[in-house]
Every structure is written in structure tokens, then in C-alpha cells.
Amino acid sequence: MEVDRRHYSNSEITEIIGNIYRPPGGEGGFRDLSPEAWLEGGEIIFKQARERGLPISCAFADADSLKALNDRIGHAAGDELLRTIDSSIRQSDFVVYSARVGGDEWKILGLTDEAGAKKIKQRIKLNTQEYVIAKGGYPGLGVGVSVGIATALPESEESLSALLERADTDLRADKRNNLPVFNRKQRLAVSLSSVALRLANVHPRQFAKYEDLK
């Protein structure tokens, strides 16, 4: 489903995003907010999306095994992991509001539908996986990122709190099972990669890529 543009031209959508856009930390450093402060800004964004008849999506991102990485490898490695996640949050994905609300957790709002929310999730996860692979996999630590998403369409009467609760439920599910569904070609590729990773003593579960990413 495309972003609902029944009442707006492409240029008007761009102007709307520009008017309410609040930069992610990735564009000039971490944007750190308390959960209460983030929610205050989130309510404003949510209300504006509702008034304009636009879909709005929420994404929660949470760095996996950050403490283990800091303890075993060093805080410089942990900081680099956090910067990788942060830099994956982009305005080009219709993100209008994001912040780090804890040492290893981000809350994100985007003026986009479910397909766009999946793109935000996939970009964060894939970029982080590529970073971990480039660093040798950090075998045995389970380093990575979990992401949960949820979308409210214009016709929905869902509240922001309900939307956030669904995103949090999806985040917890992603933490429990980070393996996606593969098509036949990708299953073969992952199987071959798994053999190579096992020979290198790296757990293949960390590096599965999503079916929709090419």
C-alpha cells in the first residue's frame, strides 16, 4: 500500500514532512530524550498526521547484547554499534521524529504505511548485520538489533499509546525469533552461508537477511 496521498500532491507531502520533521540522531549526533519527553513530541506528530489524513508508523529499535559487547570487546565497539543503528534512521524513509530513549533503544515515528514501516525495519537490521559481519561477527555474543513496528492508517481510531504497545509487542517477538521467512533461492544462499559461518565459528542466526531486501 502506498502512502495515502488522496488529498495531497507529492510536493505537499514533502512540505508537510519538512514542517514537522525533527532530525534523527544520525544527522548530527545522538538525539537523546527521556521516554516522557519523546512521548510529548510524539503526541504532536501523531495529532498532525491524523489531522492531515496520513498513515503513521512507529518503530522501536533495541541493540542486542550491547553490555556483552562492551564487556568483552570494549566500549568503543559498543559505541560503533550504536552509531550504526542510529545512522540507519533516515528522513528518506519518511521518518519525521526519532530519538534514543535509553542507552540502547530508539523510538521512531514515520509518515508512512505498513510497507514503509517494514522498509525502516529492514534498513536498520540489514545495516547492523552488515556492520557485525564486517567486524568478524563477534562470535558467541549475539550482537545485533531487534526492531518492532506498527502502523495506524488514516481511517483507524487507534491512539498513539495503542500504536506504541503494538510496536513493543512486535519488538519482543523479534527478539525471541530474529529469523525471517526465506524464499527458496535465499534459503539456499543462507544455507551455504551458514556452512561458511560455522567453519568460521560464527553463529549464522546473526546474519539472516530479509526476503524483501535485494
Image (spheres, rainbow, N blue to C red):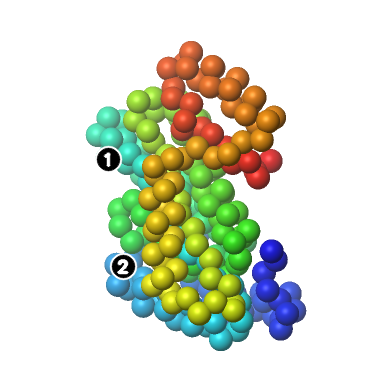
Q: Residue furthest top?
A: 199
209 relative to 18, above or below: above
Q: Which one is nearer the viewer's eye here, 18 or 185?
A: 185
Place of residue 16 in the rendered image (x, y in percent of width and height, measured from the top left): 61, 79
In the rendering, which numbered label is found on residue 67?
A: 1
147 relative to 142, above or below: below
Q: Which one is nearer the viewer's eye here, 147 or 91?
A: 147
Place of residue 157 in the rendered image (x, y in percent of width and height, measured from the top left): 50, 80
26 relative to 185, above or below: below
Q: Amino acid at mark 2?
A: Pro
Q: Dots 1 and 2: beta carbons under 8 Å?
A: no
Disc 1 secondary structure class: helix
Q: How many marks?
A: 2
Q: Is residue 205 left or right of residue 112?
A: left
What is the crowding at mark 2: few (fewer than 14 residues within 10 Å), some, or many (at least 20)?
Answer: some
Q: Is residue 145 left or right of residue 192?
A: left
Q: Which residue is mark 2?
A: 35
Seen at 68% across and 30% down, the residue is: 184
Q: Quadrant of residue 40?
A: bottom left
Q: Amino acid at mark 1?
A: Lys
88 relative to 55, above or below: above
What is the crowding at mark 1: few (fewer than 14 residues within 10 Å), some, or many (at least 20)?
Answer: some
Seen at 59% across and 77% down, the residue is: 154
Q: Earlier in the sequence, mark 1 or mark 2?
A: 2
Q: Residue furthest bottom?
A: 51
Place of residue 57 in the rendered image (x, y in percent of width and height, measured from the top left): 53, 66
Disc 2 secondary structure class: helix
Is residue 114 shown to the viewer in this render? yes
